[in-house]
Amino acid sequence: MTAVVGPNGGGKSTLIKLIAGLFDPSDGKIKRHGLEPSDIAYLAQRTEIDRTFPIKVEDVVAMGLWPKVTSSTRYTKNHHHDVQDILDKVGLSGMGRRSIAQLSGGQLQRLFFGRVMAQDAKLILLDEPFAGIDQPTVSHLIGLIQAWHKSGKTVVAVLHDINLVRALFPETILIARSLIASGLTDQVLTPENLTKAAFNV
């Protein structure tokens, strides 16, 4: 459980996208220690999502099953049951046939957490997962993240809420276009480091 924090424009989202393989580094290398693309799940900021795209809720979750669905196995009834089970777990029971345009902001975020859950990846990258959503949804999603971590998955999340980081994430990376500090959260989020990063909290 590692948080990535820092000021706006400091490179947090870029770092996450580099790890996910969406960008190639202009300098240096990204070491993924043997992880394949299917081992990494990435949840983008909601502002990057086109909500007018004509796709149903259950189909978004099913997209997360792509590593398991091959030309030989295809999409089966068991996969469909898996999707419905995931929708239940993220609090979207009975909404599978709806268009994503019909969802509220909090429901949309629950949906994309469901797609991450379907991927069952070893490394989960979350970019601002709690931005602009209500507290009950935040609490629900925190529970999902904690369950992922307890099951042995690695979670890296870009966050702005320092209090949330201190409460939930034992390790933190603080960046401001360059690395300011990394390690145990209490040792990283010191007043001196936050001032050096020009990160107002």
Image (cartoon, rainbow, N blue to C red):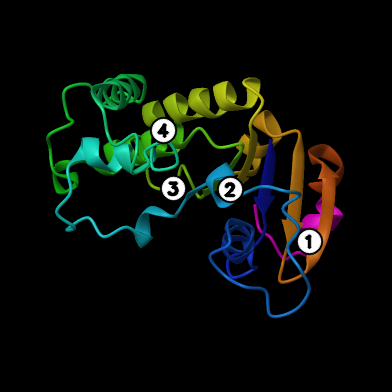
* Measured Cα–Cα span from mark 2 to mark 4: 23 Å
Q: Residue 121 location, x and y as percent?
A: 55, 37
Q: Nearer the viewer, residue 24 or 105?
A: 24
Q: Any magenta on residue 93? A: no
Where 161 falls versus 176 (above or below)? above
* Residue shown at the point (76%, 33%) measured from the top left: 170
Judged from the image, the secondary structure of the residue bearing numbered disc 3 is loop
Position in image of residue 165 (x %, y %): 66, 38
**Residue 19 location, quadrant:** bottom right
- Left or right of 67: which side holds 33? right
Mark in the foreground, 3 or 1: 3
Mark 2 belongs to which amino acid? Answer: Leu
The residue sitting at 67% across, 74% down in the picture is 25
Report the Cα–Cα distance between label 4 and label 3. Answer: 22 Å
What label sits on residue 131 in the rendered view?
3
- Pointer 1 residue: 195
* Residue that label 4 marks: 118
Q: Amino acid at mark 4?
A: Ala
Q: Which mark is on residue 121?
A: none
| Residue 174 in sight here | yes
**Residues in magenta, as a range:** 190-201
Q: Dot 1 lies on which element?
A: helix
Tag 4 and tag 1, C-beta contact below 8 Å: no
Q: Residues within 10 Å of mark 1 (few under 14, many from 20)?
A: few
Q: Amino acid at mark 3?
A: Ala
Is residue 134 rendered to the left or right of residue 98?
Answer: right
Q: Earlier in the sequence, mark 2 or mark 1?
A: 2
Work out whether residue 77 or residue 173 is closer to the camera in this orientation and state it.
77
Assess whether residue 191 is covered by the magenta stretch. Answer: yes
Percent position of residue 92, x then y: 25, 26
